[in-house]
């Protein structure tokens, strides 16, 4: 566990955020050198102990055997889902359906990202579904007559409101030491009631529905970018990833630290580039039925920016390292001088901010926001998205990319079953089985790591 601000006695912070702590000092003296080396290979990320691709592969396989498979299970599951649905319906991997699938998963992904912030602490936020709805209502009301504020002002106001809601709930959890389950469950009910009251008071004849009239917000999901713009976005994203990876590795080497083999880094860059090319080709394919339709939806680069920003926040800043430290061992983090109250409150605020973003995407996709939004179901999918992707319910382990992967898995399940004409009841049961499988994998992985640590 990476902890900035002072070492915790007996624990050496790992260079990778979210990694398991390693014993030092007297604790490290126990056991043979061979056992210690094996323990390092199991607990450290493979790229930090490998000097060649072969060593990396062996270290990675040791981690998998030790119970830390990373995102491997969800990737295998996603590939299996794609193969099954494509075999049952050849439309599944068509350009139009893949685009529709990704759009369907956007809200799940963003709400999953919101949940990751609090799950890393070992907490939970049950209110984000209606926090998202309330933020969407605020944005829509401020953009529409008679207020008619510019879209960016309305958007800022909505996001400030949802961030404040998250901070308020975080304050109740940290200052009054109330269970986050109870506080956010109360928030689920209270913010739903407030949303309904605001809509009925300001638009009594609207039937509980407020349309999105601003073209910028409406076209965020429903619009398309020029085909050339899609290639530019892909090129910028791949070049940015390549430059960051090479710079990061070079800085580690200049500092005398280990870094991934150059061949491995270049291979990752190649995989990202290939995935980007395939994605842009799909978006730029004609997917219209009655009229030509092609181009990347503007929300895709927006999602990429959010993903990169939140990943950087958790993995490369003191705030993110503190979140992992608290989730891994709150008492050790406190003794290291970390302000638990402030970090926890800030994490809940970030959850509220991200939920507000999800609300804007939700209303953009539908072209309206209604008091009938099912925030209770949305929050369940948010938790499922994060957990299925690989984030632990027990805190201390998870990344933003887990929400991305989990959201795609859930969207693929619903999209594929929808193509097959299966009933909603079947969709719920299948999603439940996938969630149980994900939690089981996480539990077994923790038991395996604990058993190996005891044996060592």
Image (cartoon, grey):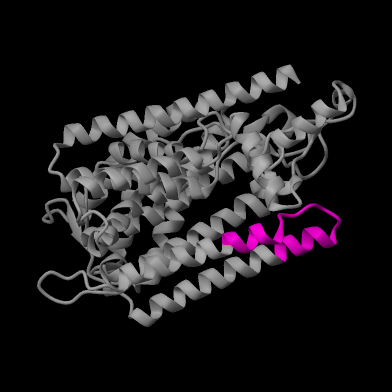
Q: Position of residue 146 (x, y in %)?
A: 23, 69
Say whether residue 441 is left or right of residue 132: right
Instruction: Report the quarter where the N terminus lies.
Output: top right
Say whether residue 424 is left or right of residue 128: left
Query: Can I make out residue 228 in this image?
Result: yes
**In magenta segment, residue 52:** no
Q: Is residue 451 above or below residue 133?
A: above
Of the pair 128 and 414, the residue shown nearer to us: 414
Residue located at (39% from left, 36% from top): 384
Residue located at (35% from left, 42% from top): 80
Of the pair 215 and 103, the residue shown nearer to us: 103
Q: Quadrant of residue 409?
A: top left
Say whether residue 221 is left or right of residue 263: left
Q: Position of residue 450 (x, y in %)?
A: 65, 21
Q: Is residue 305 above or below residue 231?
A: above
Q: Quadrant of residue 445?
A: top right
Of the pair 256 and 128, the residue shown nearer to us: 256
Residue located at (68% from left, 40% from top): 59
Q: Quadrant of residue 436?
A: top left
Instruction: Report the quarter where the C terminus lies.
Output: top right
- Identity of the residue furthest to the front in this view: 54
Q: Position of residue 124 (x, y in %)?
A: 47, 33
Q: Which residues are magenta?
A: 247-268
Query: Can I make out residue 134 in this image?
Result: no
**In magenta segment, residue 260:** yes
């Amino acid at each position: 566990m990476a902890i900035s601000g002072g070492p915790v006695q007996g624990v050496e912070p790992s260079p990778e955020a979210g990694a398991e702590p390693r014993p030092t000092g007297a604790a490290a003296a126990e056991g043979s050198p061979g056992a210690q080396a094996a323990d390092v290979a199991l607990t450290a990320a493979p790229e930090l102990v490998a000097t060649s691709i072969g060593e990396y592969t062996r270290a990675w396989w040791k981690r998998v055997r030790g119970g830390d498979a990373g995102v491997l299970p969800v990737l295998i599951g996603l590939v299996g889902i794609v193969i099954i649905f494509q075999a049952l319906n050849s439309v599944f991997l068509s350009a139009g359906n893949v685009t529709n699938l990704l759009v369907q998963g956007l809200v799940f992904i963003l709400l999953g990202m919101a949940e990751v912030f609090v799950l890393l602490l070992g907490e939970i936020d049950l209110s984000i579904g209606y926090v998202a709805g309330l933020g969407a209502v605020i944005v829509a009301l401020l953009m529409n007559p008679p207020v008619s504020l510019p879209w960016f002002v309305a958007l800022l106001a909505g996001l400030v409101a949802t961030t404040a809601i998250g901070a308020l709930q975080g304050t109740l959890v940290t200052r009054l030491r109330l269970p986050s389950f109870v506080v956010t469950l109360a928030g689920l009910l209270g913010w739903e009631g407030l949303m309904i009251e605001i809509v009925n008071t300001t638009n009594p004849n609207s039937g509980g529905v407020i349309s999105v009239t601003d073209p910028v917000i409406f076209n965020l999901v429903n619009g398309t970018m020029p085909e050339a713009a899609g290639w530019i976005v892909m090129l910028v994203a791949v070049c940015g990833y390549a430059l960051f990876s090479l710079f990061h590795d070079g800085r580690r080497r200049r500092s005398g630290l280990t870094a991934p083999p150059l061949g491995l880094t270049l291979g990752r860059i190649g995989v990202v580039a290939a995935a980007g090319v395939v994605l842009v080709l799909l978006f730029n394919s004609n997917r219209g039925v009655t009229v030509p339709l092609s181009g990347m939806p503007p929300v895709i680069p927006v999602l990429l920016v959010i993903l990169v920003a939140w990943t950087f926040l958790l993995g490369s800043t003191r705030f993110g390292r503190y979140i992992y430290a608290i989730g891994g061992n709150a008492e050790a983090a406190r003794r290291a001088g970390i302000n638990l109250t402030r970090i926890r409150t800030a994490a809940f605020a970030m959850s509220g901010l991200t939920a507000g973003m999800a609300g804007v995407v939700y209303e953009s996709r539908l072209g309206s926001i209604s008091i009938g939004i099912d925030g209770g179901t949305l929050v369940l999918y948010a938790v499922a998205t994060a957990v299925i992707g690989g984030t632990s319910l027990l805190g201390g382990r998870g990344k933003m990319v887990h929400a991305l992967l989990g959201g795609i898995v859930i969207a693929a399940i619903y999209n594929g079953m929808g193509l097959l004409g299966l009933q909603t009841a079947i969709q719920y049961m299948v999603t439940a089985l996938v969630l149980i499988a994900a939690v089981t994998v996480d539990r077994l992985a923790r038991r395996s790591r604990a058993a190996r640590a005891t044996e060592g």
